[in-house]
Image (spheres, helix red, strand yellow):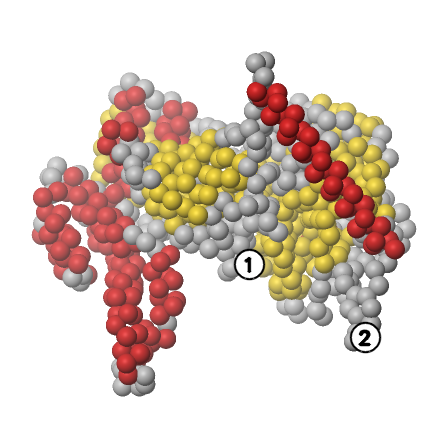
């Protein structure tokens, strides 16, 4: 069945957080539903649609920002009580807007995630989970990493209460009371959880999850162990998943999966005979989709998908046909209702234009007076700085509630800016003085009109660490700018993992000294991405990492007075030794440093680099031949006389050029890693071999794996 959905913009509220918009249950069969949404101004807005217009039901007074909104009520009854999380407080409203609950929790920080099931209330701050029943404290759990979302399995289908926490370290933590029942590893940091079909499926145990790198999955959470049912791999490199819902938009009696992403994509998945998801429909919006739900809002009898975006637009994708086509000789009649709507919109637009003109003149006059006071306009920025495993680059996403004028990017550490297909901004680079000021990058992105979201890709070099800064200037008067800072860490291309291969040849770095568990943890946080800032519970901890560029690995085990770091890449150990020594010296702590270098690890690392280096050299050679082969094609016409290899280069020329363009400085980066490996190998032996680097580069230019291995052994 072909799915045709038409976009309808209903209303705009303030900036919203994920999971802050819901549809109230319909009062009758096929009747339209009311929409309730909470924003950063602290306002809860409830409205319905009548004759295409948004009609308010109630609106609360402004206050602190609303971080979550959920519906509740007694089990097996319509869920029509509205609950909002504001700071560390929960407030409850009836569907008419009367406040019936104000519950101040014992959390010392703001609520980040919330789920309601009957009399049970599940709340999460950054690391703390609390379970309340009838507003009385029941259970408590301290998570090992940040909690992004919380969900409880269907209480209507199961006799047990099973809360699940989605944590930043790529783990779902399944709880029983205040205890951890088991952990489930997922393919990316999970950002959102939902019950399959809205009720956990046939078993009531089916849990959907979405990750910050755009993957989706379904897991059955049994009492004994998890059952992985399916996972998607995000082939199209779309944004992170922010919201999910289940709704029968096709009208075939089976609920589809609705997905909203942070790049503005709305997707609908149906399920095939094997119950695997199949993409049926997608539509791009210009800003992040914070909330999504299926229902009937605009007109009786027409289902739709309702979304709430970052800047507060509530928009529907409706099954109601938007256009009526006239046949030959027919006149297309516009209904009286539509004519009235167009007239009222024109009148409203004229009034707004006149008001803007008046206010602008008023501001200009006040700005010229001697007592002029210019207020700096405040604007919200939604930001995301994450490491992509696929291409070992950092993705920086900046989203502003109003149009962006320009973004200035400055870095005190060498980084490469990569091309982003979705990015329509014009970039210009300024000359930098790297020596006296430590300024390695200065680039300005000038955005096109009405751009509210900008995505940048950055590739860093391990061992070189510092700060990347983004100065964001929106198109508002008077001109104002916000600066955002992002740390480029010493081992910036390493990503947390939970399993490593223990049979690899490992180099070991051991630190001992008079330092506390908290101090050594702060050093690891300084060196590595994706480590929770909070000191772990217990006497010791072990973290595993994988290099996203080379696939080498690192194991960190540390406790009070001792830290042991193992890696199959000698350069990783060298960077850690230098940085940890520097950090300890700053705190005036004496460190005893010992290391055990495994000679086999160097050959092992070179073997891991080999396929990447060979591929890049071959790609560079093919790209060099393209122009000559195209010229030959123009002169000769028929290219059948060419050997198959050259014909293949001609046929794939577009893909080859695209890949080459996407990976600038890739070859230089690999050369740099091999050079560092060479220098670090001999540095641990107490020998300086920098004078031999030119010979190494000559060998790399006429690359042969055996010659390179021999040079490393005999240099």
Residue under the image location 57 percent in, 20 percent down: 368
The residue tagged 2 is 329
Circles 1, 2 touching at the beta carbon (< 8 Å): no
> In terms of sequence position, does the residue under pointer 1 or pointer 2 come before the other?
1
**Quadrant the N terminus occupies:** bottom right
- Image location (x, y in percent) of residue 670: 26, 52
| Residue 180 appears in the rendering | no
Considering depth in this image, is 445 or 308 the residue closer to the camera? 445
Mark 2, Cα crowd under 10 Å, few <14 / some 14-19 / many 20+, is few
Q: Quadrant of residue 56?
A: top right
Residue at 37%, 72% (x, y): give it: 652
The residue at 59%/49% (across/down) is 286
Out of 334 and 613, give the one closest to the viewer: 334
The x and y percentages for residue 451 are 55, 45
Taking the image as shown, residue 704 lies to the left or right of residue 153, namely left
Which residue occupies 66% across, 70% down?
A: 273
In the rendered image, residue 333, in percent from the top left (x then y), is placed at: 84, 63
Residue that protrudes farthest toward the top in the picture:
371
Picture layout, residue 697 above or below residue 630: above
Per the image, the residue denoted by label 1 is 232
């Amino acid at each position: 069945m072909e799915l045709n959905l038409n976009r309808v913009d209903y209303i705009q509220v303030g900036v919203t957080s994920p999971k802050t918009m819901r549809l109230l249950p319909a009062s009758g069969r096929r009747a339209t539903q009311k929409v309730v949404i909470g924003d950063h101004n602290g306002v809860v807005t409830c409205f319905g649609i009548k004759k295409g217009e948004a009609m308010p039901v109630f609106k609360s007074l402004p206050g602190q920002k609303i971080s979550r909104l959920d519906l509740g009520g007694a089990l097996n009854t319509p869920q029509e009580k509205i609950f909002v999380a504001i700071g560390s407080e929960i407030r409850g409203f009836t569907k008419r807007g009367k406040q019936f609950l104000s519950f101040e929790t014992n959390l010392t920080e703001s609520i980040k995630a919330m789920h309601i099931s009957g009399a049970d209330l599940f709340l999460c701050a950054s690391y703390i989970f609390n379970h309340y029943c009838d507003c009385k404290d029941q259970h408590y759990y301290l998570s090992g990493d940040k909690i992004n979302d919380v969900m409880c399995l269907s209480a209507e289908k199961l006799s047990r209460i099973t809360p699940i926490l989605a944590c930043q370290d790529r783990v779902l933590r399944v709880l029983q009371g205040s205890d951890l029942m088991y952990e489930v590893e997922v393919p990316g940091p999970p950002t959102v959880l939902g019950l399959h079909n809205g009720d956990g499926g046939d078993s009531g145990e089916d849990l959907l999850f979405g990750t910050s790198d755009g993957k989706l999955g379904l897991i059955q959470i049994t009492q004994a162990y998890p059952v992985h049912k399916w996972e998607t791999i995000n082939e199209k490199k779309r944004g992170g998943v922010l919201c999910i819902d289940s709704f029968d938009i096709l009208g075939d009696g089976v609920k589809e999966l609705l997905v909203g992403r942070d790049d503005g994509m709305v997707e609908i998945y149906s399920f095939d005979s094997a119950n695997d998801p199949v993409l049926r429909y997608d539509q791009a919006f210009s800003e992040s989709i914070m909330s999504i739900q299926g229902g009937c809002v605009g007109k009786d009898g027409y289902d739709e998908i309702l979304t709430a975006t970052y800047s507060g637009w509530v928009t529907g994708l409706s099954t109601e046909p938007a256009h009526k086509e006239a046949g030959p000789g027919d006149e297309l009649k516009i209904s009286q209702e539509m004519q009235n709507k167009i007239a009222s919109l024109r009148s409203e637009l004229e009034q707004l234009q006149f008001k803007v003109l008046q206010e602008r003149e008023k501001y200009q006059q006040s700005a010229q007076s001697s007592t002029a006071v210019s207020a700096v306009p405040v604007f919200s920025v939604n930001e995301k700085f994450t490491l992509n495993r696929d291409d070992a680059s950092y993705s920086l996403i900046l989203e502003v509630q109003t149009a962006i004028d320009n973004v200035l990017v400055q870095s005190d550490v060498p980084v490469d800016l990569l091309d982003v297909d979705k990015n329509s901004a014009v970039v210009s680079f300024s000359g930098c003085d790297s020596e006296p000021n430590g300024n390695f990058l200065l680039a300005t992105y000038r955005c096109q009109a009405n751009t509210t979201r900008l995505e940048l890709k950055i590739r860093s070099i391990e061992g070189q660490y510092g700060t990347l800064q983004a100065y964001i200037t929106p198109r508002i008067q008077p001109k104002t700018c916000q600066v955002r800072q992002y740390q480029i860490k010493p081992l910036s291309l390493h990503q947390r993992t939970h399993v490593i291969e223990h049979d690899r040849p490992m180099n070991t770095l051991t630190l001992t000294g008079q330092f506390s568990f908290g101090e050594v943890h702060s050093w690891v946080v300084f060196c590595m991405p994706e480590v929770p800032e909070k000191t772990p519970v217990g006497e010791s901890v072990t973290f595993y990492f994988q290099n996203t560029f080379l696939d080498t690995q690192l194991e960190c085990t540390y406790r009070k007075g001792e830290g042991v770091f193992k890696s199959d890449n000698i350069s990783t150990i060298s960077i850690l030794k230098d940085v940890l020594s520097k950090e300890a010296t700053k705190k005036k702590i004496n460190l005893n440093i010992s290391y055990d270098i495994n000679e086999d690890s160097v050959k092992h690392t070179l073997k891991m680099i080999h396929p990447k280096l060979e591929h890049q050299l071959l790609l560079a050679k093919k790209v060099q031949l393209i122009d000559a082969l195209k010229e030959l094609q123009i002169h000769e016409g028929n290219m059948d006389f060419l050997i198959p290899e050259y014909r293949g280069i001609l046929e794939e020329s577009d893909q080859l050029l695209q890949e080459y363009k996407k990976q600038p400085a890739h070859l230089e980066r690999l050369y740099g890693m091999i050079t560092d490996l060479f220098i670090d190998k001999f540095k641990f032996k107490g020998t300086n071999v920098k004078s031999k680097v030119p010979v190494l580069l000559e060998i790399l230019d006429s690359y042969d794996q055996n010659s390179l291995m021999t040079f490393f052994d005999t240099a």
